């Protein structure tokens, strides 16, 4: 078992020494700008926008409740589930 560990360590050291000895390839062209290669962004669907709005509202409520020690022993997943259901039912 010790021989395997030693052999693995030597192989790793050897591979690292070979990698350090080879020079990095020179970059011949400048990288493309993001604006040139980026695809235009699609607009978000109404459901995704509504989800993000509910998530932000629930997050703000969670922070307030946490600061006031009013979470009633709930963790974020339980709080989020109840808050999300409440906001969906309210139509926001």
Image (cartoon, rainbow, N blue to C red):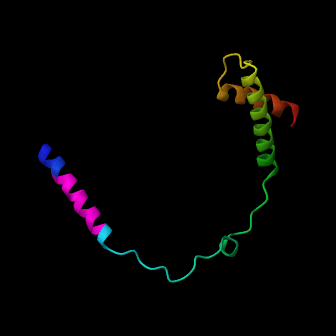
Q: Decide whether the magenta segment is chiefly helix, strand or loop.
A: helix
Most distant residue in the right direction: 91
Residue pictured at 68% horizontal, 70% vertical: 38
- The quarter in which the N terminus is drawn is top left
Q: Nearer the viewer, residue 70 or 81?
A: 70
Residue pictured at 71% horizontal, 26% vertical: 79
Q: Quadrant of residue 78?
A: top right
From this view, report whether residue 28 is shown above or below residue 1: below
- x then y, percent, for residue 88: 82, 34
Most distant residue in the bottom direction: 28
- The quarter in which the C terminus is drawn is top right
From this view, report whether residue 82 is shown above or below residue 92: above
- x then y, percent, for residue 30: 57, 79
- x then y, percent, for residue 9: 21, 52
Instruction: Write the start and end of the magenta stretch as one range.
Output: 7-19
Question: Magenta includes 47?
Answer: no
Q: Nearer the viewer, residue 62 or 20?
A: 20
Q: Quadrant of residue 22?
A: bottom left
From this view, report whether residue 77 is shown above or below residue 1: above
- x then y, percent, for residue 68: 76, 20
Tally the numbered discs: 0
Q: Nearer the viewer, residue 45 or 37?
A: 37
Residue pictured at 76% horizontal, 62% vertical: 42
Image check: 37 left or right of 68?
Answer: left
Most distant residue in the top direction: 72
Q: Quadrant of residue 51?
A: top right
Residue pictured at 74% horizontal, 29% vertical: 63
């Amino acid at each position: 078992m010790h021989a395997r560990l030693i052999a693995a360590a030597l192989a790793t050291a050897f591979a690292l020494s070979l990698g350090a000895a080879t020079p990095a390839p020179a970059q011949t062209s400048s990288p493309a700008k993001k604006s040139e290669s980026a695809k235009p962004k699609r607009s978000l669907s109404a459901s995704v926008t509504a989800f993000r709005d509910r998530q932000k509202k629930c997050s703000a409520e969670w922070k307030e409740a946490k600061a006031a020690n009013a979470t009633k022993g709930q963790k974020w997943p339980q709080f989020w589930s109840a808050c999300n259901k409440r906001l969906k039912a309210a139509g926001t």
